[in-house]
Amino acid sequence: MDETVAEFIKRTILKIPMTEMMTILKAWDFLPENQLQTVNFRQRKESLVQDLVLLCESKRASLRDAALLDIIYTQFHRHQKVWDVFQMSKEPGEDVDLFDMERFKSSFEKILRRALKNVTVSFRDAEENAVWIRIAWGTQYRKPNQYKPVYVVYYSQTPYAFTSFCHLKSNAPLLSQALTVASNHHKIVKMDLRSRYLDSLKAIVFKQYNQKFETHNSTMPLQETLELDMHMDSRIIHENRIEKERVQRVTQETFGDYPQPRLEFAQYKLETKFKSDFHGGILAERKEPLRCLIKFSSPHLLEALKSLAPAGIADAPLSPLLTCIPNKGMNYFKIRDK
Amino acid sequence: MEWANDKSKGGVLAHLERLETQMSRSCKNLEDPPRETAESDLGTKIHKLRCLRDKLRAEVKQRQARIKASTASAEPDQTLEISEQEAVGGKEENMKAILQAYRFTGLSGKRTSRGVCVCISTAFEGNLLDSYFVDLVIQKPLRIHHHSVPVFIPLEEISAKYLQTNIQHFLFCLCEYLNAYAGRKYQADQLQRDFAAFLAGPLQRNSLCNLLSFTYKVEPQGRSFPFCARLLYKDLTTTLPTDVTITYQGTDASSTSWEEQRASHENLFFTKPLHQVFTSFARNGERLDMSLVS
């Protein structure tokens, strides 16, 4: 086994937390069950890793096997990457898409190899007819860097592809081209949507985040009175109960009853003229637009926005710039004067 | 002259007090008999009132018993009232059940505060499959609020064509697509689940289930070479393939018997749902076994 491959496998296994070690190795399915049982999983991690690497060497693990292990690790730790979303489109009136996964994979790889000799492309099928693609980029003279791969997740016969952040911006057009052509599309555009939470991005663009529907089977709850009433002493009267109920209603109409998809930030780039009531102010005469960047960050941005009005921190309804995020599938905005 | 001696205990004021108490005591002795009589009078009064109360209580009980007896004989009237109530309640339950059962028609809906929530229940060969929802907002223009239609179904295309102009056509078109998709998916799932023994490799499929590629044998344990099948469903509103390609990779590919089989298989795949094709393979296999036994 190549030294670089051994080193790569060693570093990949070292990243795996001990609690997940068995699960990931089983998913990899490279080392058979009986061999894994001969290994002492209770020893110190460094020694365990050494034993495992020796086993891999004895089975002559290739770069391909190592890349597969890397994909599985990333699938378990997808939140460690930041994901972008691309939207592809076809010409109108095109034939029905007869997507063939094997043809897609070979076409994708061929396009990359034609342009770049030094590239490692690996595939792993996933649920819902999707595929995870791992690409390690090299240059004309250098072998692929296995430690900075790019991942692409593509669900067949959909116009969306999710890619992990790519440091080498120069390879982005090639990647886009490969994706578009292999999946029978014509154009590709990068969406203004980015997050660590791949599943939330999928829920947003596939419009799967609101799955509550009224049917005759379910009984709709009556207009819910404020929860305050249940626990409060009957001698306490809420002076602003009407306003509180209005805020509750507006929030429910805007955000719905469902769990919000998870995003960590929303960014607004403003290029607008300063508007002031005071004439003759310092900035009033300024002809050039002001440029500023406003960023909202949160461990769960949409839930935080949903709780703003009920908590009394903001007025309801919230600005549509904030509430349109899942609907428009954007969390990067550029605001200019009309 | 005890007074003089008493006087010495506490002085004049104390003496006066003693006199006062003496006097009041003597007065009390005079009053006691009347007091006692008053008390005994009250006692007897209480006793009388208690007796009256008990009598009245007994009378009330009697009357209640009489009423109960009379109502028992008059029961038919009451039960009539109850049964009417039950009838109304039963009708309500019935209505609810009918509304719920509308799902089985394939297309049902429920009014919402902003419009209607349409439910498309798919089915294939009498099996009820997944339901999909489209929540419509009744405004000008008509729009879809949210839905559970999979992303690879061309919902945008269909709504662009028909939603504003002919909502009936929009719903029927969507029904067609979804039912066909559900039918194809059902066939592929059945093949993978019930006829895995016939497959020589994994079933290759895609999201729309409109391209299926697999290798199969006619007999699960047969030693014959497998056939390769490639089924294309170019029409997304059908559950049967539009293109079927069967290839045989055995060494005696040129022999007529295999060519006949290949052609007959092609025909089968064109005309019957997948799982029925494989059921007939299984049955043929059984027939062969039976013939061997007999």
Image (spheres, coloured by chain):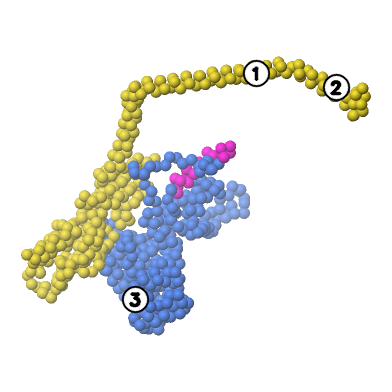
Locate the N terminus of chain A by quadrant.
bottom left
Question: Could you classify mark 1 by the number of other residues whose Cα lies within 10 Å: few (under 14), some (14-19), or many (20 or more)?
Answer: few
Q: Colour of chain A?
A: blue
Q: Amino acid at mark 3?
A: Asn
* Quadrant position of residue B138: top left
Residue at screen point 43% across, 22% down: B64
Query: Residue drawn 52% across and 55% down?
Result: A272
Separation of marks 3 and 1 at Cα, in angstroms: 105 Å
The residue wearing badge 2 is B19
Q: Identify the image quadrant of residue A108.
A: bottom left
| Mark 2 closeness class: few <14, some 14–19, many ≥20 residues within 10 Å | few
In percent of width and height, residue A55 lies at 37, 80
Residue B32 lies left or right of residue A310; in this view the side is right
Residue at the disc numbered 3? A34
Is residue B92 magenta-colored?
A: no
The chain identifier of the residue carrying mark 1 reads B
Residues shaded magenta: A233-255
- Cα–Cα gap, marks 2 and 3: 117 Å
**How many marks do you count on the picture?**
3
| Chain label for disc 3 | A
Q: Is residue A310 visible?
A: yes
Nearer the viewer's eye, disc 2 or disc 3? 2
> What residue is pinned by disc 1?
B40
